[in-house]
Image (tube, grey):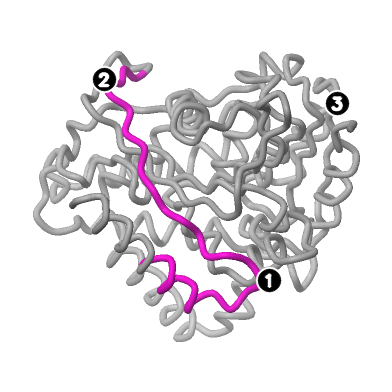
Amino acid sequence: MNPVARTFASLLLIIAASDMFGADYPAPTEGDYIVHDVKFTSGETLPELRLHYRTIGKQQKDAQGKTTNAVLIMHGTTGSGAQFVPRPEFADELFGKGQPLDATKFFIILPDGIGHGKSSKPSDGLHAKFPRYGYLDMVEAQYRLLTEGLGVNHARLVMGTSMGGMHTWLWGELHPDFMDALMPLASLPTQISGRNRAWRRVIIDAIRNDPAWNGGEYKTEPPSLRTAAETLWFMSGNPVLRQKEAPTLAKTDEVLDKFVGQIVKTDDANDVLYALEASHDYDPGPNLEKIRAPLLGINSADDLINPPELGILEREIKRVPHGRASVIPLSDKTRGHGSHTVAVLWKDELVKLLKETEPSQ
């Protein structure tokens, strides 16, 4: 496509997106950054790695050329940057005029992680021959996207939900001087273990031991993708919410079938398998003292994946030099693990964090 046609096509996408967005913030601009000759921590390589992203707002730099208003927001497992917009309970509460991350003031970056969304992933064609990637690879790719692809050399805030929350802890350790503040949501600063590891293993084993998976070379989605979807439904909500939406046997089957049907229609078993296995190298525990930026970890009391009974967040946050933690109590507004996307539950804490870390003029 020639440059004029490409520009015109981009404008059409923005105009079309604007019609979808009734919220008081600009429609996202989408793009791809290609990284060449990538070597993963597994030792495997990829000639080209495509990193897809969305941005809202405009980047600003000070007189010294330092980016002053970039906000990186990272998504959860099997999600993408698209999950945040248009979404009233998240984007409308954060990106509109006068909101905590007002898009007229901030440059918001919503990347698709490796193996997710429109970034390079197994289902593009390599299937189970796609390189094994981990969270360390994903964070490094995000760093290269920001610094090399978008020219961002500093972040006002780095935050994420679920897997993105785990990436936030790693960002703080691997690039401690890059950001003013960190806010991981729905995550724990420790190696994945216990029930959190177990539900992942259930899905991983179901796919890998499914004869229809055929070593990743299936023609139609294997039945084990349904097992993955059913497990995700079980783990992502809270018991009160699930009982309310599924109060009878018949209604439960109806709700579950609808949820599973949507995932089977849009997801891919290899992509799901890789996304879950990617957490194998997540372990921020040994390096928490290296986090220099103020960090606010937020979880919810009804999160089955990161239950507060473990006391891990409260214990480990003491090792973060400028860290504090908050656990949202169960209410009719919380959604279990999914509370991370209901911004009204925690945006006051975000406002406080931004005020506390306001750079001196």
Q: Amino acid at mark 3?
A: His
**Residue contact between numbered discs 2 and 1, judged by CB atoms under 8 Å:** no
- Residue sitting at 65 percent across and 40 percent down? 70
The crowd level at tag 1 (other Cα within 10 Å; few <14, some 14-19, many 20+) is some
- Residue sitting at 61 percent across and 43 percent down? 59
* Secondary structure at numbered mark 3: loop
Q: Amino acid at mark 2?
A: Asp
Q: Which residue is mark 3?
A: 322
Query: Which range is magenta?
Result: 13-40
Q: CA distance from mark 1 to mark 3?
A: 35 Å
Q: Which residue is mark 2?
A: 37
**In the figure, is residue 92 to the left or right of 80?**
right
Q: Amino acid at mark 1?
A: Val
* Secondary structure at numbered mark 1: helix
Residue 240 marker? 1
Residue 39 sits in quarter: top left
